[in-house]
Amino acid sequence: MRREVVFVTSEMYPFSKSGGLGDVLGAQPLALHRMGVPTSVITPFYGRLRTADYGIHLTISDCHVGYPWDPITCDVYEADYHGMKVYFVHRGEYFDRRYYYNDHKGDYFDNCERFIFFCRAVMALLRRLGTPPAVLHANDWQSGLVPAYLHFWRQTDPFWADTRSVMTIHNLAFQGRFASRLFTGCGLPPQAWTMSGVEFWGDFNVLKAGIAYADMVTTVSPSYAREILGPAYGCGLEGILQARQHALHGILNGADYGIWNPAQDKFLPCRYGPEDPQGFAGKQRCKTALLDELGLAPELAHRPVLGFIGRLRGQKGIDLLLDIVPRLMERDVGVIILGEGNLAHEARALDLMETYRGRLCAVVGYTEDLAHRIQAGSDIFLMPSRYEPCGLTQMYALRYGTPPVATAVGGLRDTIMPWPSPEATGFTFGRSDPQLFLEAILDAVHYWEHDTEGWRAMMIRAMRQDFSWERAGRSYVNLYRQLGFDFS
């Protein structure tokens, strides 16, 4: 039996998704699998898991985990996802909840216990399956203990001796920081409780565990890998990241063009692409249909429509957009907002929709089909993020011929060629400031209004950008080779 790369993740589209992590883990392992890398995924079995299209079945009953007390077990379900195995760890009291990590009141009080259990269950499952992985590839804090367990256990258990680990940071701001008492009994030895280990200002930091003990650490764009080495973006972990800089790699995420592609998008009223002579007419029909669907003024079909899709939180800069809405309305543009998050931002967006009815639409929540139609039906896509480790929605916007206006940070800097370059695919501005954001939008609107041929050329360049997972996958194959595994 060939040894595998086993991805460990708290979410995976299409089974579970709260944001970009789910999209990435729905595409990255499958892309590697199709490139010939033996790959599988382990993820929780949530109560709201989407199971209808896949033959999910119970494969192991009562797998011993032993946390938080000795008799505790989990059930393991399995699915065949396009030829790749996906395992689901089930324990009802931890994962049968409406939301994955939190509700509007805040994080679940037992998140630390939930994901210690998950990480312990991952290791127990792999031991039960009987073949040690080549690489354990953990993602974000929810699986951050897996590299730490591996680091200590392979020193005493020959089963793990040749397994290596990768820790991918999708967003350094979410660290899994908990009270020190929760370290006791988590399964790590006392020597892990150091400044170079899991201890962080007296607290137990689960992401720091993954960074400290993984064989390789990756982030999701080259720019973000550089940014997090300093205090502005390091979120307090810049010290340990600097110490591990030799093992830190920035690899740009990919976009799943099997799902996000206007030439074959099942959610669109009209499909189009850069090679289609009717492509611009197709995008215009998508725009007209979107205006009708959302109850926006039909005359906006002949004016720029600006789209925003994302969490309504400070990181995504939604407050910057809400601040400048009155100025945008003076320019006779349309604005569409899709997302959920901070209740104050949600309420403010809905209030603005009442003030500018027919010109601004705010949809609180998230639906996959509407997100696709907003990408296709908007003229300009807005991403005023304060920081952006990689970003996927700007990659989607490029493929849909919707030039972004974005902050020049992280993955946004790595994926958007800014106007006025002759090779421009979008517009960027230097820092999270509402005036700078407004000026960048007005530059885009002016270009849209006064240079139709130039705008169409920008759209075509954007649509032809290649941020596929096949490209990103080659970088991960090279990384695994550095760990001693050649899957060719």
Image (cartoon, grey):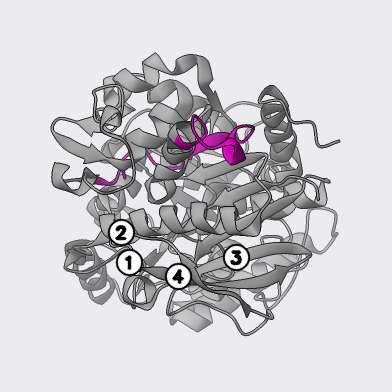
Q: Amino acid at mark 3?
A: Tyr
The answer to which of marks 1 and 2 sits earlier in the sequence is 2
Q: Amino acid at mark 4?
A: Cys
The residue labelled by disc 1 is 340
Q: Nearer the viewer, mark 4 or mark 1?
A: 4
Q: Quadrant of residue 261?
A: bottom right
The answer to which of marks 2 and 3 sits earlier in the sequence is 3
| Local secondary structure at mark 2 | loop
Q: Which residues are magenta?
A: 153-177
Q: Quadrant of the C terminus?
A: top right
| Local secondary structure at mark 4 | strand
Residue at horizontal 36 percent and vertical 59 percent from the top: 117
C-beta proximity under 8 Å, tags 2 and 4: no
Residue 74: numbered disc: 4
Mark 4 and mark 3: Cα distance apart in space: 12 Å
Few, some or many residues within 10 Å of mark 3 (<14, 14–19, 20+): many
Mark 2 and mark 3: Cα distance apart in space: 32 Å
The residue labelled by disc 3 is 87
